[in-house]
């Protein structure tokens, strides 16, 4: 099993910044993707950014140029630096970890979510 502990959410004015952290513990595979998703009220959960086991960072178009994902493999921690925040970024942000058994088979884990609210 894998446990994910998120922190860093909160209330910020438009144009401000927040940094989310997610520390993973338990059975962490060396081959894993770590990332962030978000879900706004009345909307489906969507990908924000992922950092793949191959070392590639991927972003949703809506956050490119404003958000930066990074990871510390020694600490099994993934970060999301969010700059130039907009009211549309308001959502619950979820940490996600995929432990890969093969290219297409993986175990998936979710954090409990952290609220990010951007006021206009």
Image (spheres, rainbow, N blue to C red):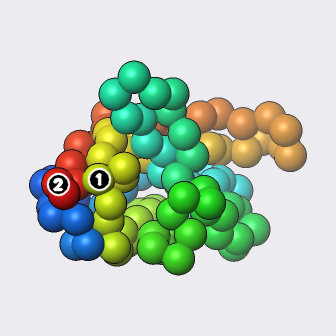
User: Is 36 situated left or right of 19 in this image?
Assistant: right
Residue highlighted by disc 2: 119
115, above or below 1, in the image: below
Q: Quadrant of the C terminus?
A: bottom left
The image shows residue 47 at horizontal and vertical percentages of 57, 46
Q: Position of residue 49 (x, y in %)?
A: 56, 58
Does the residue at mark 1 contact the one at mark 2 (Cβ under 8 Å)? yes
Please report the residue visible at 45 percent of the width from the left and 70 percent of the height from the top: 67
Which of the two discs, 1 and 2, labels the residue nearer the N terminus? Answer: 1
Foreground residue among 44 and 97? 44
Left or right of residue 106: residue 91: left
Q: CA distance from mark 1 to mark 2?
A: 6 Å
Asked if residue 15 lies left or right of residue 50, the reply is left
* Residue at (43% x, 42% y) in the render: 38
Q: Residue furthest top?
A: 42
Residue 59 position within the rendered picture, expressed as x and y whole percent measured from the top left: 61, 62
Q: Nearer the viewer, residue 83 or 97?
A: 83
Q: Residues within 10 Å of mark 1 (few under 14, many from 20)?
A: some
Instruction: Give residue 20's position: percent from left, percent from top.
Output: 31, 61
Residue at disc 1, secondary structure: helix
Q: What residue is shown at x 62% (from left), y 44% (from top)?
A: 98
The circle on residue 87 is 1
Q: Residue 107 shows which numbered tag? A: none
Looking at the image, residue 9 lies above or below residue 105: below
Q: For the residue carrying disc 2, how many other residues have a C-alpha within 10 Å: few (<14), some (14-19), or many (20+)?
A: some
Task: Give the mark count.
Answer: 2
**Residue 66 in sight:** yes
**Residue occupying the point 15% across, 61% down:** 12
């Amino acid at each position: 099993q894998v446990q994910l502990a998120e922190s860093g959410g909160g209330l910020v004015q438009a144009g401000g910044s927040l940094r989310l952290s997610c520390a993973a513990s338990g059975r962490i595979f060396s081959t894993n993707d770590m990332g962030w998703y978000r879900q706004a009220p009345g909307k489906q959960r969507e990908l924000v950014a992922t950092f793949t086991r191959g070392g590639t960072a991927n972003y949703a178009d809506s956050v490119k140029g404003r958000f930066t994902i990074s990871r510390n493999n020694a600490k099994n921690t993934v970060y999301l630096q969010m700059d130039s925040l907009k009211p549309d970024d308001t959502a619950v942000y979820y940490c996600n970890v995929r432990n890969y058994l093969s290219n297409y088979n993986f175990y998936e884990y979710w954090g409990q979510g952290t609220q990010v609210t951007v006021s206009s």
